[in-house]
């Protein structure tokens, strides 16, 4: 066994010990919940690992992608809202859709104006006018429709389909968004992709928070179904609360874990295969890769979209497990930068590293909540004991400390272990 | 006439103030990019930090009974700017310089700046909590009115004293920066290094000094912008995430690395945002008889809650049409 493998095995063994320790200390239900969420985060981290580790592409918009994944699974799996379907809502939305299609055709026509001899500045003017008209037409249809739906039916409700369909749909929608962002930004400097993804995720957050007719916004949607029986279902069969919780969460973990395992197998095969080699070649020297005849931009778009699919599915898994979709609970720190810490600490470019980083950092992140409160509580006790008085707002402040520690971890990792705990293995020759 | 005054009050004043804030922030981003070649994401938090430093100093002044003809926030601004500049230098020494020394790629520095963002934000929240604060809890905002009755207007043109001061401060700073970049030896060295770092070093420019000066300017301007933002609206710890997109959009629109471009970009984004959420119904109502539709409620290009999209859309258009920005900056 090479030292790298020994090291990885040792780290994984330590992780298992840590999880068992949590199980003993915090109880089995807490641990099963942690494991399910860690599996979802592992999927998300693997998605980012494809983008950043394989492709060298930034994605600071993970939060937005997770929100879209969550909104999609809500929309697909939530029970059908008869009030909406019996009202004029579908008809109004249909008209808005037609308006959008007309606008799209108008823009398409303007873009092809050079075929009838309109060129240069005139064509640009035409495109701008087409966009303006489309926007006005669309707004004139969608605004009354949304106001009507919000007043009459609350929101559009769901489709009542299985949860797994919702996860897949979320992955698909996120892939579409990633494709558009990638089309615009890939091929430019990497910083542009970073800022564009931050922008798109903030916009998605604003949209999902405010599109009450579609997502119910900050009013939140619940309960969202699980792909496996809920604890209540087990209880209905006469099981006691404790074991029902464990059975239900265990079932959910099996589903999520199976997805992670399948993705992991596929990724490791892809990484070792010609595709993975090509991707690493592009990441390390895109000029050389380009001169070897690889279509750099198209391949980068491919990894960006591929990674985003996993991120979208992960977002769906998280939301359906929590059973509530609350757009107000999404924060860039918890949902974007936490994933980055997982990848950086675990080891970018190495799937085992990403998996380790995701589970390890998530466990630490969860545990840091009681630990921070314990620490600050004792400091506060001490300061009031000395006579300085207790620290005000101790609860919220101690949680903010975690943000600082997260930043510190990034800085330290970049400086002293820039390749992560389980670094990518450079294959020179066999 | 009243409509015009309404327009001036709502768009011209607000747009100029917002544009000034964006411009000051974008100059810092663009200078750091030009000299150090990485997108400094912690700039938004440096602004917030500067705002909080000014806030603390203002509170100290108020406690000591110091007050002047202008709001305390402006009195303490120079001190706060100096403090933030020193902190910016310290941040560079502690987190960016070691990575540069190792020869890390600009990408690594970008990620490091995310780490710095989180640390600053964590510390701010730790010390100040998550509540919203205002500079004007103890002193009133003076409102200046210009009577327009001689032009037939029934309402005056109004803006607040801080708004006027902000614009003046921005103009002074921009002019000083212009003089520095175009006249002084150090400023010329900065521009030379921004154009070609290797060539600058070979021709005997002290690059370490240039880097230090860049951080001092960027930190001071970030503090100024953050304080102004806090004076204009309010001071919250999560100011940064909302501000970082418009500021980067302004820097990219102006051409990354171009200080003058950043000023233009800042005002462009500031006015675009203000115009986009402006309620046109008041202006259009006199022309109701010629319009094909009836004016009910508010008419704005973009609903207020989607104000953020404006900067993003402009950014996307610029990236598609002219990736180097208005003033040719770096692209690939």
Image: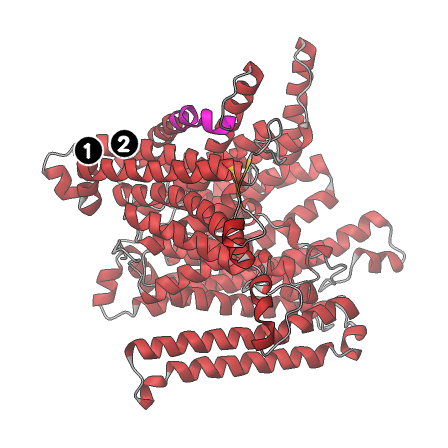
Looking at the image, do the residues carrying marks 2 and 1 touch, with CB atoms under 8 Å apart?
yes
**In the displayed structure, does residue B111 sit left or right of residue A231?**
left
Q: Who's the residue at 50% across and 66% down the image?
A: A177
Q: Secondary structure at mark 2?
A: helix
Is B278 situated above or below B46?
below
Q: Magenta: predominant secondary structure element?
A: helix
**In the displayed structure, does residue B26 sit left or right of residue B175?**
right
Residue B144: % across, % down? 53, 38
| Residue on which disc 1 sits | B186
The answer as to whether the residues below labels 2 and 1 share one chain is: yes
Q: Residues within 10 Å of mark 2 (few under 14, many from 20)?
A: some
Q: To which chain does the residue with label 1 belong?
A: B
- The image quarter containing residue B235 is top right
> Would you say residue B167 is visible in this rendering?
yes
Range covered by the magenta-colored residues: B71-83
Is B61 situated above or below B169?
above
| Residue on which disc 2 sits | B213
């Amino acid at each position: 066994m090479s030292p790298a493998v020994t090291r990885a095995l040792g780290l994984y063994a330590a992780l298992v010990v840590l999880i068992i320790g949590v199980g003993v200390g915090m109880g089995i239900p807490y641990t099963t919940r942690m494991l399910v969420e860690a599996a979802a985060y592992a999927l998300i981290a693997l998605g980012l690992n494809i983008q950043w580790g394989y492709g060298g592409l930034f994605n600071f918009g993970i939060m937005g992608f997770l929100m879209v994944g969550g909104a999609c699974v809500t929309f697909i799996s939530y029970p059908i809202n008869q009030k909406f379907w019996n009202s004029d809502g579908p008809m109004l939305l249909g008209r808005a859709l037609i308006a959008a299609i007309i606008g799209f055709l108008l823009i398409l026509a303007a873009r092809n104006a050079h075929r009838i001899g309109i060129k240069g500045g005139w064509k640009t003017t035409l495109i701008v006018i087409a966009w303006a008209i489309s926007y006005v037409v669309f707004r004139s249809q969608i605004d009354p429709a949304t106001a009507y739906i919000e007043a009459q039916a609350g929101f559009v409700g769901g489709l009542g389909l299985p949860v797994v369909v919702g996860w897949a749909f979320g992955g698909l929608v996120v892939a579409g968004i990633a494709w558009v962002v990638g089309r615009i930004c890939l091929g430019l400097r990497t910083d542009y992709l970073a800022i564009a993804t931050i922008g798109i995720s903030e916009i998605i957050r604003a949209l999902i928070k405010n599109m009450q007719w579609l997502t119910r916004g900050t009013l939140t949607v619940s309960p969202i179904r699980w792909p496996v029986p809920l604890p209540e279902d087990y209880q209905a069969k006469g099981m006691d609360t404790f074991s029902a919780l464990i059975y239900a969460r265990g079932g959910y973990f099996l589903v999520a874990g199976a997805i992670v395992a399948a993705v992991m197998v596929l990724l490791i095969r892809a990484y070792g295969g010609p595709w993975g080699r090509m991707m690493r070649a592009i990441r390390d020297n895109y000029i050389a890769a380009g001169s070897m005849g690889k279509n750099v931009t198209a391949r980068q778009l491919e990894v960006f979209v591929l990674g985003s699919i996993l991120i979208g599915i992960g977002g769906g898994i998280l939301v359906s497990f929590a059973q509530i979709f609350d757009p107000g609970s999404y924060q860039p720190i918890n949902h974007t930068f936490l994933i980055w810490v997982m990848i950086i600490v675990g080891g970018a470019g190495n799937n085992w590293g990403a998996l380790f980083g995701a589970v390890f950092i998530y466990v630490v992140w969860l545990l840091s909540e009681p630990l921070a409160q314990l620490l600050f509580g004792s400091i506060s006790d001490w300061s009031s004991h000395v006579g300085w008085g207790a620290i005000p707002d101790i609860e919220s402040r101690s949680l903010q400390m975690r943000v600082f520690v997260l930043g510190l971890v990034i800085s330290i990792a970049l400086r002293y272990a820039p390749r992560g705990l389980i670094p990518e293995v450079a294959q020179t020759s066999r | 006439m009243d409509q015009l005054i309404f327009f001036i009050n709502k768009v011209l004043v607000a747009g100029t103030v917002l544009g000034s804030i964006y411009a000051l922030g974008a100059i810092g981003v663009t200078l750091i990019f030009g000299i150090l070649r990485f997108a400094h994401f912690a700039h938004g938090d440096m602004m917030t930090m500067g705002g909080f430093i000014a806030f603390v100093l203002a509170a100290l002044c108020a406690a000591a009974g110091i007050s002047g003809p202008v709001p305390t926030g402006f009195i303490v601004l120079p001190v706060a700017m100096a403090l933030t500049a020193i902190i910016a230098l310290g941040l560079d020494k502690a987190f960016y310089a070691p990575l540069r020394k190792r020869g890390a790629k600009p990408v690594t520095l970008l990620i490091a700046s995310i780490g710095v963002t989180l640390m600053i934000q964590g510390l701010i929240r730790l010390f100040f909590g998550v509540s919203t604060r205002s500079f004007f809890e103890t002193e009133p905002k003076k409102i200046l009115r210009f009577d327009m009755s001689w032009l037939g207007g029934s309402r005056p043109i109004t803006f607040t004293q801080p708004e006027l001061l902000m614009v003046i401060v921005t103009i002074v700073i921009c002019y000083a920066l212009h003089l520095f970049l175009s006249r002084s030896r150090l400023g010329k060295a900065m521009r030379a290094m921004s154009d070609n770092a290797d060539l600058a070093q070979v021709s005997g420019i002290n690059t370490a000094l240039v880097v230090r000066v860049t951080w001092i300017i960027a930190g001071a301007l970030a503090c100024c912008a953050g304080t102004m933002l806090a004076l204009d609206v309010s001071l919250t710890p999560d100011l940064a995430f909302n501000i970082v997109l418009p500021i980067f959009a302004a820097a990219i629109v102006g051409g990354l690395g171009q200080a003058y471009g950043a000023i233009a970009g800042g005002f462009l984004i500031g006015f675009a945002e203000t115009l986009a959420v402006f309620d046109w119904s008041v202006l259009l109502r006199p022309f109701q008889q010629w319009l094909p539709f009836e004016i009910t409620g508010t008419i704005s290009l973009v609903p207020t809650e989607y104000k953020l999209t404006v900067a993003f859309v402009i950014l996307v258009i610029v990236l598609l049409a002219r990736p180097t920005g208005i003033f040719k900056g770096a692209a690939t």
